[in-house]
Image (cartoon, rainbow, N blue to C red):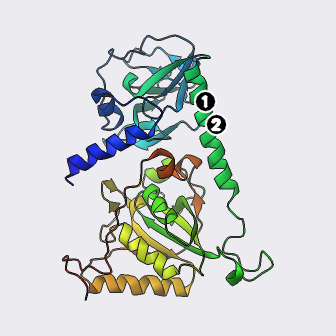
Amino acid sequence: MADGALAAASEASMQNVYPMPPLSGVEADVLLRKATEPPYSGKYLGNHAAGTYICRQCGMPLYRADDKFESGCGWPSFDQEIPGAVRRVPDADGRRVEIVCANCGGHLGHVFEGEGFTQKNTRHCVNSLSMSFATAGSPEEKAALARAAEVAQVAQAGHNAQPSSVGQPGQSGQPAAAQPCSGEAIVAGGCFWGVEEAFRRLPGVCDAVSGYTGGHTANPSYEDVSRGDTGHAEAVRVRFDPSRISYEQILRRFFEIHDPTQLDRQGPDFGEQYRSAVFYRDAAQKATAEKLTARLRELGYDVVTQIAPAGPFYEAEAYHQDFARRTGRGACHMSVPRFSQRADGSPVE
């Protein structure tokens, strides 16, 4: 499928997932393709009603009307978001900070600090086309707040389900080999949403958690890692049942769902945080990673995957966990049978 057709199909599927009407062309331009509506044209610029502004794409609450103020910039302005509703990422222009819906990733606008408009000293400059407005007490507002509460509850339940003794032999009173989910692999292959989703569907995998590892900053946030100066990679920690699937099978899958020949990038995502890497926990895991990368090179692949000892793994924020299943987005890692297909496309005999 051509890139344009693939993008169109992806956008169509995204719009069908959410409890919101389909996006219009101009709404899709802003939310999906990061366009900007003309200044002073947005329908919410002069709106002063009480209520909640919600994401036009996924219906999750973004801003409270009480936090809206007049800045004279030509777009709706807010001095704070609803906690956890908005994510900050470096803009493609290298200067500004983009803001996106933390649930679906839809483009909202940009955030600026230090301008002194309000005591909070922050201005979220948001496209009206990125939002819908739910009047205070309306069924729409109640439904949006209920969706947010449900997502938070699911994320918290998933976090609480993580055992504290993963990979720690003897802490449960029995050897690690007797524990069904005692295997652990940590890999990095670009955006962790897609990597996590690919492993969640693999038989024998108990769970997959998105996080950050391989860097020099303690307890990094997504914004820290996105700057590209912490040394961390977006990574996934995979817990698996060794009686059903082996570490080698995990790594074989890993090398098929991302491109190990791309240095410090993966597809459209550039930066050290998107590097290809295997973080091994012992000599056996290291040997397996080296064996598989050597095999791929024999088949003609110029593998650049980093093989490094595992260090601290920091779980990513709750809104990143299980992202693809929750939102219908992020499952972007396509499988390529690299161990049965040479780099030139010929089959392996």
Amino acid carrying mark 1 in the image: Leu
Residue 58 percent coordinates (x, y): 46, 35
Question: Cα distance, mark 2 to mark 1?
Answer: 6 Å
Q: Quadrant of the C terminus?
A: bottom left
What residue is drawn where x is 27% and y is 43%? 8
From the viewer's side, name the closer residue of 240 and 266: 240
Residue at mark 1 = 145
Near mark 1 (Cα within 10 A), the count class, few <14, some 14-19 or many ≥20, is some
Tell me the element at label 1. helix
Is 66 situated above or below 269? above
Q: Up-down: is 49 above or below 345?
A: above
Q: Where is residue 212? Give x, y as percent.
A: 53, 60
**Is residue 325 visible to us here?**
yes
In front here: 224 or 198? 198
Residue at 45% x, 41% y is: 104
The amino acid type found where label 2 is placed reads Ala
Please give the residue where the numbered disc 2 appears in the rendered image. 149
Relative horizontal placement of residue 41, taking residue 186 as reference (left or right): left
Between residue 270 and residue 301, name the one nearer to us.
301
- Tell me, yes or no, whether the two marked residues, 2 and 1, touch with CB atoms within 8 Å: yes
